[in-house]
């Protein structure tokens, strides 16, 4: 996710984008082709990112990446292969900026609903 620039956006926009994804069989090959160059360079990219970080900074980065990765599970796209997921992450860069408000709204709706359910459980 980091290598594609997706992490520049907040979790609500990312989750809303993931909820909006509809993939057909023709898209799979295209997304794999988009994702391949990123995966090919991922190890070098990751090493370049952490080379100057302290152990604490590496732990914070890893925690952040895990939390953002959990959004794929919430949106039920975590079962897709890594090339397809990476293609999805990168394809976000081509979404219309006007759609970002829609994505954010959908992500916020999810988190507000989750908070409401949690709050209701606490009052039972």
Image: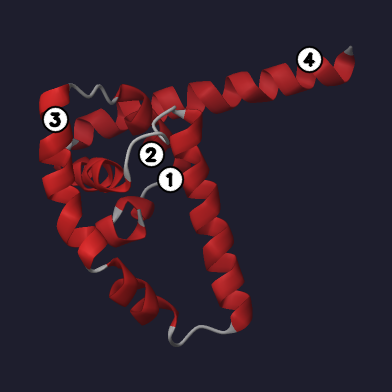
Label 1 Cα crowd, 10 Å radius (few <14 / some 14-19 / many 20+): few
* Upstream in sequence: badge 1 or badge 4: 1
Report the colour scheme: secondary structure
- Quadrant where the C terminus sits is top right
**Image height of 20 relative to 8, above or below:** above
Disc 2 to disc 4, C-alpha distance: 26 Å
Q: Please report the residue visible at 53 percent of the width from the left and 53 percent of the height from the top.
A: 66
In percent of the image, x 11 and y 47: which residue is there? 33
Q: Nearer the viewer, mark 4 or mark 3?
A: 3
Q: Quadrant of residue 49?
A: bottom left
Could you give the CA–CA distance between mark 1 and mark 2, rounded to whole angstroms?
Answer: 6 Å
Upstream in the sequence, badge 2 or badge 3? Answer: 2
Q: Residues within 10 Å of mark 2 (few under 14, many from 20)?
A: many
Q: CA distance from mark 1 to mark 4?
A: 26 Å
Which numbered circle lies on residue 14? Answer: 2
Question: In the image, is 122 to the left or to the right of 81?
Answer: right
| Residue located beneath label 1 in the image | 10
Cβ atoms under marks 1 and 2 closer than 8 Å: yes
Disc on the earlier residue, 2 or 4: 2
Crowding near pointer 4: few (<14 within 10 Å), some, many (20+)? Answer: few
Numbered tag placed on residue 27 in the rendering: 3
Tag 1 secondary structure = loop
| Position of residue 45 measured from the top left corner of the image (x, y, whole percent) | 30, 73
Element carrying mark 4? helix
- Determine the residue located farthest toward the right in the rendered image: 124
| Side of 45 relative to 122 (left or right) | left
Percent position (x, y) of residue 6? 32, 50
**What is the number of the mark on residue 22?**
none
Across and down, in percent, residue 57 comes to 57, 76
Name the residue carrying label 4: 120
- Mark 3 lies on a secondary structure that is helix
Q: Of callouts 4 and 3, which one flags the residue occurring earlier in the amino acid sequence?
A: 3
């Amino acid at each position: 996710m980091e290598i594609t620039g997706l992490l520049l956006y907040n979790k609500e926009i990312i989750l809303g984008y993931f909820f909006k994804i509809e993939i057909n069989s023709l898209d799979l090959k295209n997304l794999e082709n988009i994702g391949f160059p990123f995966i090919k360079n991922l190890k070098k990219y990751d090493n370049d990112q952490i080379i100057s970080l302290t152990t604490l900074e590496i732990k914070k980065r890893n925690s952040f990446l895990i939390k953002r990765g959990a959004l794929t599970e919430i949106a039920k796209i975590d079962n897709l292969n890594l090339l397809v997921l990476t293609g999805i992450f990168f394809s976000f860069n081509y979404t219309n900026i006007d759609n970002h408000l829609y994505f954010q709204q959908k992500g916020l709706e999810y988190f507000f609903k989750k908070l409401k359910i949690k709050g209701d459980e606490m009052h039972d």
